[in-house]
Image (tube, rainbow, N blue to C red):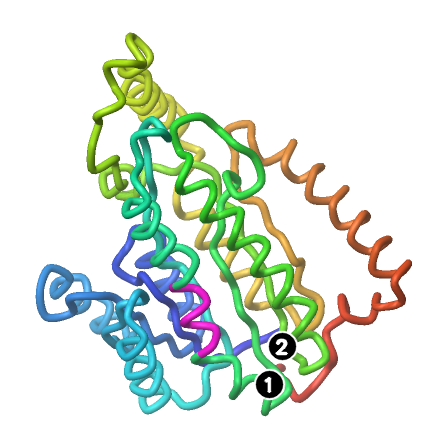
Amino acid sequence: METDMNILITGANSGFGQLITSDLLKAGHRVVGSMRDVHGRNRDVALRLRELGAEITEIDVTDDKSVTDGVTEAVSHVGDIDVLINNAGVGAHGLLENFSPEDFSHIFDINLFGVQRMIRAIVPAMRARGNGLILNISSLLGRISMPFYGPYIASKWAVEALSENYRAELSAFGVEVAIVEPGGFPTGFIANMKHPTSRDRDESYGAMATAPQLSLQQFEGFLAQNPEQAPQIVADAIVAIIAMAHGTRPFRTEVDRIGMGGPIREYNHHLAQVTAGVYANLGIEAMLQVAMGETKSV
């Protein structure tokens, strides 16, 4: 069982981020929580996490220098990073046609390019040590499309593909890649969603123009009627994955109790078989197995 790990998590100010940070500390890990505006709008959150024992560093995942400086500071707090949790993200909701290229760019800069920036900053040291875990927080909407979440879905599908590639390219260096796919949860995610900057296409959609808002209201009501879909189960899943022995962690973990997780789990299982078959046919099946290096374990 993996224990006593040095962990860096982005978006530690979010609903999931705060829970994950708190629970990892309780599990005995050293955690650096990163966020923007540590001395501004996130000051109180940063203070609470520090009181729990976390180190806090400022990272804006859309800024190269901020990422480099933040990772350097994180290492100065706890030493080499054993686990990177890419949790920072932003949702999107509205008619897809209303979203401008600039809207898409903003969403992808956080959800996809931010993940790439963080991995590039962290993974060279992991490769050099022959050990490490990159855990990307995706979504069940990274596996299936639902109306009105278009840019968010596109960014998460891209995160899934990015993770697939890193899994193969880093396995020989002992670096493990895993994805957690939550369903919809009652966090601040909905309130902080990105909506189209302009709604200039609404008129031509007629009554359909009101459908996104009605759909979102209905979903919020649905979540309120299903208390078992609690954010805590996402934190529990992440703590459990990190505790697993190196090389044994599942590549994908679905977290959902409102009807999406089961079908997506079957889909993921089938894709895993397809991937294994294609890799075997090409003679590169070893790239799906993590090389075993030195680990921190008890």
The residue beneath circle 2 is 175
**In the image, which residues are magenta?**
114-120
The residue beneath circle 1 is 127
Residue drawn at the location 56% of the way across and 35% of the way down: 144
254 in relation to 175, above or below: above
Measured from the top left, where is residue 126 in percent x and y? 55, 84
The answer to whether residue 4 is visible is no
Q: Amino acid at mark 2?
A: Val
The answer to whether residue 133 is visible is yes
Q: Amino acid at mark 1?
A: Arg
244 in relation to 4, above or below: above
Report the magenta stretch's main SS: helix
Real-space Cα distance between discs 1 and 2? 7 Å
Kind of element beneath mark 2: strand
Measured from the top left, where is residue 197 in percent x and y? 20, 37
Q: Is residue 163 magenta?
A: no
| Relative horizontal placement of residue 184, taking residue 244 as reference (left or right) | left
Q: Are marks 1 and 2 in contact (CB under 8 Å)?
A: yes
